[in-house]
Amino acid sequence: MKGVRDIQIRVHWSSGVSEKFPELSICIGIINNIHVEKENEQIQTLKKTVYKEVRAKYNLETLKDNPTVRAYRDFYWKLDIDPTKTRPSGEALLRRVLHVKELPRISTVVDAYNLASMKTIIPISGFDKDRLNPPFQIRFARNGEIFTGIGMSKPMPLTDKMLVLADEKQILCIYPYRDSDYTKITGQTRNVLVVGYGTPGITEEQLKEAVETTLSYIRLVSGGETEVVKVFRKST
């Protein structure tokens, strides 16, 4: 496909991660030849539709008891992250809308995957595929390893308690809540790799549904063609 850098998807788990989280899985999807805009009529309509759906389905008082919310909160505690202070991204987005607030307006593509994350309560990343250098690895960071996340004014040093998704050259995400600034989606992005982050208690079907929802939303607001959707487990 002209203009698309071929990417061979492989995901490896470090032994430390496999021992601590043997059930961990992720889902990866790719969509090519998109057109990123600041905003358009399609994303405005989609936001209204999804806001209405989630406000009818959830309420703030009982959200903490939702099984998906519970699974990610339990996972955060195991990573020594307080989920009431650093909320899992899907839950954070959903709480914002349940407070009758708007999601941040970034771009059609970023807004689309935020909507999908909010609707499914699954943390989702979207990366500029042409800035990635697979294979990917899920591992614990090395003490002092440097990472610059989206919106950060300066790099931060990581600790060996922090779980990360990395490629051959860089850390892509502090798993599963802070994405790298270097690989973020911009107005020049044409090809996107989407990651749905699993946790113990989340099924492969939930992950696949979240990524498929994300890709369908992106196609709706920015065009493009889906290349692949696949769940990766420790054994794959």
Image (cartoon, grey):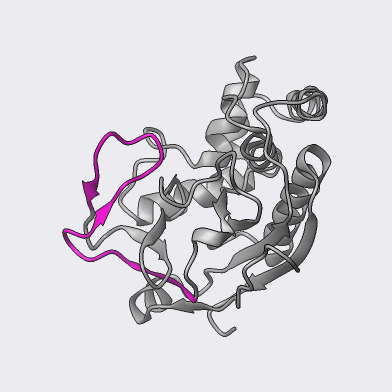
Examine the rendered structure and indicate whether residue 9 appears above or below residue 163. below
Q: Is residue 19 above or below residue 57?
A: below
Horizontal side of 115 relative to 165 (left or right) equals right
The percent coordinates of residue 159 (x first, y second) are: 21, 57
Q: Is residue 173 magenta?
A: no
User: Residue pushed farthest left?
Assistant: 144
* Residue shown at 69% from the left, 44% from the top: 120
Q: Nearer the viewer, residue 74 or 14?
A: 14
Number of labelled discs? 0
Any part of residue 121 in sight: yes
Q: Farthest bottom residue? A: 235
Q: Residue at x 34, y 55 (%)?
A: 79
Q: Which residues are magenta?
A: 135-157
Please report the residue visible at 56 percent of the width from the left and 48 percent of the height from the top. Answer: 123
Q: Position of residue 218 (x, y in %)?
A: 75, 44
Task: Please state, as top left, top right, bottom left or bottom right, where the N terminus lies in the image.
Answer: bottom right
View extreme (front): residue? 2
**Front residue (pair 59, 91):** 91
| Residue 197 visible, this angle | no
Magenta segment's dominant SS is loop
Q: Assess whether residue 143 is covered by the magenta stretch.
A: yes
Picture quadrant of residue 90: top right
Image quarter hosting the C terminus: bottom right
Residue 117, quarter of the rendered image: top right
Coordinates of residue 200 in the picture (x, y in percent): 53, 63
Q: Nearer the viewer, residue 9 or 62?
A: 9
Work out whether residue 61 or residue 57 is closer to the camera in this orientation and state it: 57
Residue at image x 71%, y 38%?
119
